[in-house]
Amino acid sequence: MNRREIILAGTIGGLVALLLIGWSIRSLFLVPLRDLDRRAADLREKLNKIQTERRNFFAAEDRLKALAPRTFSDAPDPAIARSGEMLTRLISRSGLDGSEFTRLPISPRNLRGASEVGWSVQGAGALPRVVDLLFSAQESPYLHRVENLAITVGEGPAHVHISFRYLTLVLDPSPDVARPDLPDRLALDSPERRLLDGIIQRDLLRPYIRRPPSPPENPAVKPATPGPPPGPETLKIVSLSEWNGKPEVHVRDLTAQKTLRYQPGEAFAGGTLVTVDYRSLPLPGNSLLQSSSRAILKIGNTFWAIERGQTLADKRKLESKDLPPGIQ
């Protein structure tokens, strides 16, 4: 080899050596550093996500703590009882006859993070009193929703039939907070209530009724056909609510079309009403359905139960193991 070839070979060998040294440095230092940077970025992203979820959790917890005092209870059965007591109070405060109203509890419906409970209310009364009731129910300070409202004309001017559903929530899990009795948000003489007076003054719910023709001078009077004689099969339990912490049994007389009220200790269905059992138990005769309440009565030394929605003729005998703990 001549001198020129030796210099060229040395130059090429030096370049190859530099490339090898550079690749070695990259493999030993740069690649691990890039891996560390990537891992650090992933950890920062996960940390930011955890911090965001933590902030959202505490914000949701504060919101639940603010909403929990506006719920009736932290369990479905007490919530149903307290909301039913409130509805009874609103009906009475509106000047309506409580015997003209039926309140049927609605079975709890499971939602995400809560259970929905409430009452189905039906009744009749003067239009101004019904408007007062609807206004009071809608402006209730508790967490609620009024839905399925239906109003139809009644027997006379400014008299209507009404039905609606009052629903509330039971948080699950519920924060441990105090639940005081909340005052009414708006009074019946408030300016907001006065905005509804146009409905009453113009009797907007009543359609035009043509005047009936004059009756003949001597109409033939037909004797009234007597209805079926009253019996236990014509007396149906339509509501098992509470008033001031004391249970009440509302029985609808299907013959006389009126509602009777009973409280523990009073004569009832040939015996004595003992209490109202609000435990959720399988419905007798159909274990796939749940019964939320039943009336307990005593005839002699035997205890009997009548489920809500059944007639007095459907009473069933109870064994000792089926009695509520207080009676046992």
Image (spheres, grey):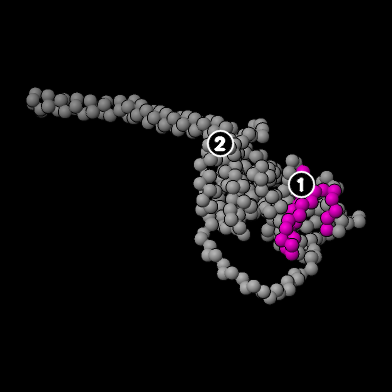
Question: Pointer 2: what residue?
Answer: 190
Please report whichever mark, 1 or 2, sits nearer to the chain's N-terminal start: 2
Q: Is residue 241 above or below residue 206?
A: above
Q: Amino acid at mark 2?
A: Ser
- Residue 259 pos. (x, y %): 73, 56
Q: Is residue 254 magenta?
A: yes
The range drawn in magenta is 246-269
Which residue appears at 61% of the width and 47% of the height? 129
Q: Nearer the viewer, residue 103 or 78?
A: 103
Q: Amino acid at mark 1?
A: Pro
- Residue 317 pos. (x, y %): 84, 59
Q: Is residue 11 left or right of residue 106?
A: left
Which residue appears at 84% of the width and 50% of the height? 266
Screen quadrant of the N terminus = top left
Give the Cα separation between the discs numbered 1 and 2: 33 Å
Q: Is residue 138 magenta?
A: no
Question: Pointer 1: what residue?
Answer: 247
**Disc 1 crowd, CA 10 A, few/some/many (<14, 14-19, 20+):** many
Which residue appears at 9% of the width and 23% of the height? 3
- Residue 211 pos. (x, y %): 55, 65
Which residue appears at 46% of the width and 29% of the height? 47
Circles 1 and 2, Cβ within 8 Å, touching? The answer is no
